[in-house]
Amino acid sequence: MKFEDILDEIDGFGPFQIAVLVLLWVPRMVLPCHFLLNNFIAASPPHRCAIGGTFGNLTEEQRLTVSIPARGDGGGPESCEMFEEPQLQLLANGSRGADPPTLRCQSGWVYDNSTFSSTMATEWDLVCDRKSLTQTTGSIFFLGVILGGLVFGFLSDKYGRKNTLLASYITATVFGFASASADSYVLFAVLRFLTGFGLTGIGINALVLTIEWVDTEHRLFISVIGGLSWSAGNMLLAGFAFLVNDWRPLIVTVTAPLGLALLTWWWVPESARWLLANGKVEKAQFYLDKCAKFNKRPKASSNLKLQKLADFETLEKKKKNYTYLHLIKTPKMRRLTVLTGVVWYGVASTYYGISLNVGGFGLNIYLTHFIYAAIEVPAKLTVYFLLGVFGRRRCQAGTLLLTGVCIITNMLLPPGLWQVRAAVAILGKGLSEASFTTVILYTAELYPTVVRQNGLGYTNLMGRVGVSVAPLILLLGDVWTVLPQVIISSVAIVSGLASLLLPETLNARLPETVDDVEKPSGDEITPESVEPPAVFLQSKNI
């Protein structure tokens, strides 16, 4: 007897499974609100040097004229420089002659508060020489995500999904609210790191709990519906940011739903799969009976049968001695490991590189973010259809290469064609989402069963590295305006080409052992229709 047989008895896709999905939708919606929060709390609005001193009866416009040099593009005063001495002659003849000496702002800055009433940049003057610190908080947050993935993955397997989920809720809630009251940049960065650490546990455990209660036939469907929580939360973030344009209350607003998650945690069931695998038969029986009752089915198998299954699962668990080293011990596994690592890094870096850059298309920042989020829904649904038509490899390569092409096209289009540039950018964002959806499915089908979890852990780590680097890439715009786009498009194209070197898995029996992967090309496994275990991945909740 297998666990799937038990699920068949009590209905592996009924009201109970839908209830679990609904209970975990709200906390999963919080993830994109925090992952992309830097778009709003770290925004740097237009600014100029604050000017002091007395200027007689001069108007404000005249004071600016004699105190701050005009930008070369005619777009107003310089943001980071002021004249060393007032240039009163500019009022008489409009010409300053030889360039007068300038210096950095001496008395702080004046900010345009028409879009944001307050951000990190305006409160702590993170502009000009210090503006890199705003993007740095994004990378620090994602470093917390990396560490959280390693720690909560271990805790989930050792202490159970439900208990670890509670720890994640508490950690993310406490440090999320605390970060809203940080009185210094350093303290804020530390608290954001810890918030990212806690949120990762929510992503891991919410997904695994949802999937481990669903039968094989409906796993792919559940993964699609569950994945839409990311898009929904991403769209809500634009609305929250529009309504709450002060950065501290905004952090509180996007963290508050975790309070509801804490209240509903009591109703979230523990994974019966995990309980049986760890010999907790009576507890597993309790949740299985609850599932059967909710689904209006007879009670689960007898305690004796469950005990036999638990003994089998425990024995199998002890037999598994595979480690991360098995990913690189043999030639084809090494090749697979390198290529999937490159693809995951490229997919994550490209997606977040686009998502964290919502300005410059002539659209309101809130509207741009909302459209970027909304395009993910049709992109996600479309690619799941195309995966069954064109295969995994073509979809993976095609979405990445086309994303790179969209970014390059945008670089070449003149700024005046902002409508066209915005349309191309939105298309690129949709394609980057499609590439993320594809890699989630594709990777799980490529790795053999005996090292699949290790393979998924490694590729998710590579994705998190790509996410952490993305905010830093955007800082290179100071060196050359289009340099971030050059790098992101190059990464997308290189990772797309790398995916062409991977084997196709459409309708192919999944490899069970390392030997299955190492077989010569002529000894490939006979293709057959198989439901892929892609849903054990963590989606973009990396």
Image (cartoon, grey):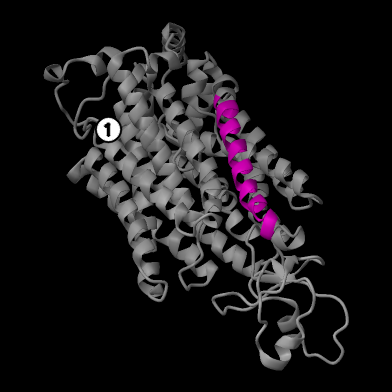
Is residue 533 something that shows in the picture? no
Q: Residue 80 is drawn in which quadrant?
A: bottom right
In this picture, residue 413 sits left or right of residue 139: left
In magenta, the rendered stretch is: 127-153
Q: What residue type is labelled 1?
A: Glu
Assign the magenta stretch its main secondary structure. Answer: helix
What secondary structure is found at the residue carrying circle 1? loop
In this picture, residue 534 sits left or right of residue 42: left
Residue 26: percent from left, percent from top: 56, 49
Count how many numbered circles sit on residues in the image.
Answer: 1
Q: Which residue carries the number 1 mark?
A: 531
Find out whether residue 135 is within the magenta segment: yes
Eyeballing the image, is 103 above or below 269? Answer: below
Find out whether residue 92 is within the magenta segment: no
Residue 455: percent from left, percent from top: 40, 24
Is residue 308 something that shows in the picture? yes
